[in-house]
Amino acid sequence: MKKIVIGIIMVLFVTVITMDNSMAMDKLNDRYYKNSDGVVLSEKEYQFVNQFYGSNYFERMTMEDYKWIQDLKIDQNEIEIKSSSNTNIVPFGTSVTQSGKTLQIVKSCSNTCIIIVKCQWNSIPSVRSYDVIGARLVNTSLASDMITTRISSTDGTEYPSDLVRLTKGFGTSVKLPSSGSSISIEQKYTVTKGGTIYASYQHAQKEITLATSKLYTITNGGYGGVFSFYGSALNVFDQMNGVDISL
């Protein structure tokens, strides 16, 4: 009889522990999201990913993708974006869409500000030559020498390094992948607080060389408020509107 009682007690104990673990897991799932690749996001990170990258992005998000946004410290900092057509500061995403592309900029500030600019191709580009992505800095400066650019597509991810640094800003030439779709070009850097960032992505409408893609100065009258092309680069790029954000 004593053995039976002990057995019942053990069954009840295991049942309670199992229920507690199940309840704890439900609570965890209320606050975190995990995809099939093992990427775990907090509620705030998940909301950001959906609004900045789209509702289908998290399903295919990799650890490399997660590390890319970790610098934003989304759970600790306020994440904001300023629309180029609206002076209001709003959480997460507004953007400029033009010529089959969507351009966005996001900032995360503490002592300095992390900036990510993203140009998402919504169509398949007919010309895949050297495009340019970069920024003009007004009353702010780079807080780190690190300017990282990446190209993502169905063919994988690359990190181009053809960077031009000028007095008022910088630009990176990016060779669009020869095949693949869902092309996204992003650029990340850190700047001091105060001032304004003007960011631009310009698409070459015909085949050009890498050297031609670097023929520009950075001025407020340039394409997207950034790039003023000259020489053989004149009238080559699509003059897409830029985005800007106050720091």
Image: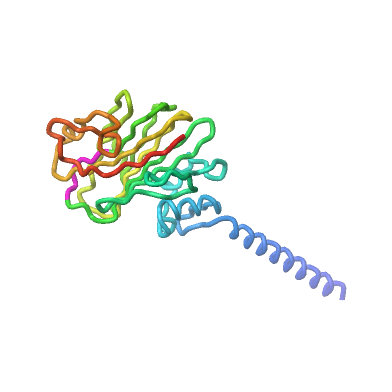
State the residue at coordinates (83%, 69%): 6
The residue stretch that appears in magenta: 127-132
Indicate how the structure is coloured in the image: rainbow
**Depth order, front residue of 85/156:** 85
Place of residue 196 in the rendered image (x, y in percent of width and height, measured from the top left): 41, 33
Residue 129 forms part of the magenta stretch = yes
Residue 226 forms part of the magenta stretch = no
Image height check: is 155 above or below 67? below
Image height check: is 237 above or below 217? below
Place of residue 46 in the rendered image (x, y in percent of width and height, measured from the top left): 50, 54
| Side of 129 relative to 75 (left or right) | left
**Depth order, front residue of 168/34:** 168
Image height check: is 62 above or below 200? below
- On-image quarter of the N terminus: bottom right
State the residue at coordinates (24%, 51%): 99
Place of residue 205 in the rendered image (x, y in percent of width and height, measured from the top left): 16, 45
Quick one: which residue is furthest to the top in this view? 167
| Side of 207 relative to 7 (left or right) | left
**Depth order, front residue of 46/9:** 46
State the residue at coordinates (48%, 30%): 193
State the residue at coordinates (41%, 50%): 94
| Side of 202 relative to 233 (left or right) | right
Place of residue 17 in the rendered image (x, y in percent of width and height, measured from the top left): 72, 63
Residue 162: name its quadrant. Answer: top left
Residue 50: name its quadrant. Answer: bottom left
Count of marks placed on residues: 0
